[in-house]
Amino acid sequence: MSLKVGCQLHPQATNVGALRSAWQEADAMGADSIWVWDHFYPLYGNPDAEHFEAWTLLSAMAADTRRAMLGTMVTGNSYRNPELLADMVRTLDHLSDGRMYLGVGAGWFERDYEEYGYEFGTVGSRLRQLEADLPRMRNRLDQLNPPPVGRLPILIGGSGRKVTLRLVAEHADAWNCFGPPENVAELSAILDDWCAKVGRDPAEVERTVCIAQDDVEDVGRYTDVGVDHLIVMTGDPFDLAPLQVLIDQRDAGA
């Protein structure tokens, strides 16, 4: 599999015009994927800065772009009913002509839960809920009429060795973690072990990695440890020069 590259646009301390310009530019540049995160408040900087909701943004992104796969990196599972989430992403898959990922994780940002009235619980309770909800999402996708247009891969984000990576092996088409390469190699080996335990070919799981803007040189450091898809993270002002560095290496056959 050749390397894929993309960007995550942070929907904080910005405006809709800047976000739209950035995702349109990234798509025109030839990005393989464009993502936003699924939170309700900023994750860094001014905690009360401007912020926008992910799935509503994805509706506009689906209409504004033509090439890139789209998704949340990743959706907080606790924030929405799993059947509703499956229906939302199926509808966006039609709007985008089959270019959606369903990215999901157990959730972790306590302020989202407290201010929006969700039960925060514990790491264990959120993981148990994710484990229960993943089959419900898959089942609902199988029942929806019309079905998704594209393949609509389910991506799970997280690095928990005992539970999250097992859930990836059991349920996911793709998995996301963060650099550096040494971290990816360690976690990827654990995921391979879980795949063996559940009777899954580890090659079936796309390995995606989020990286910082200063970590885009020499992508071979990541492809050497089995990474399929690199995603550079950026906030406003949306500097897409690091994305271009990734695209150039991808096009050169990195």
Image (cartoon, rainbow, N blue to C red):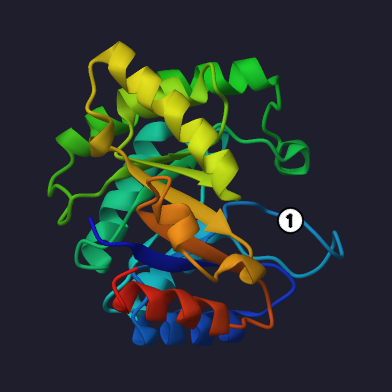
**What kind of residue is marked 1?**
Tyr
Tell me: residue 1, above or below residue 242.
above
Residue at left 42%, top 84%?
24
Tell me: residue 121, above or below residue 239.
above
Residue 105 visible at all: no
Sort mark 1 into few (<14), some (14-19) or many (20+) by Cα contacts within 10 Å.
many
Q: Pinpoint residue 94: horizontal percent, then vertical percent.
A: 21, 62
Depth check: give the residue in front, 121 or 240: 240
Split into 4 quadrants, where in the image is the C terminus?
bottom left
- Quarter of the figure with residue 191: top left
Depth check: give the residue in front, 102 or 177: 177
Tell me: residue 19, above or below residue 76.
below
Tell me the residue that label 1 is attached to.
41
Depth check: give the residue in front, 99 or 181: 181
Residue at left 23%, top 38%?
141
Residue at left 63%, top 16%?
124
Q: Pinpoint residue 213: horizontal percent, then vertical percent.
A: 63, 70
Q: Is residue 220 left or right of residue 170?
A: right
Q: Pinpoint residue 71: horizontal percent, then vertical percent.
A: 41, 57
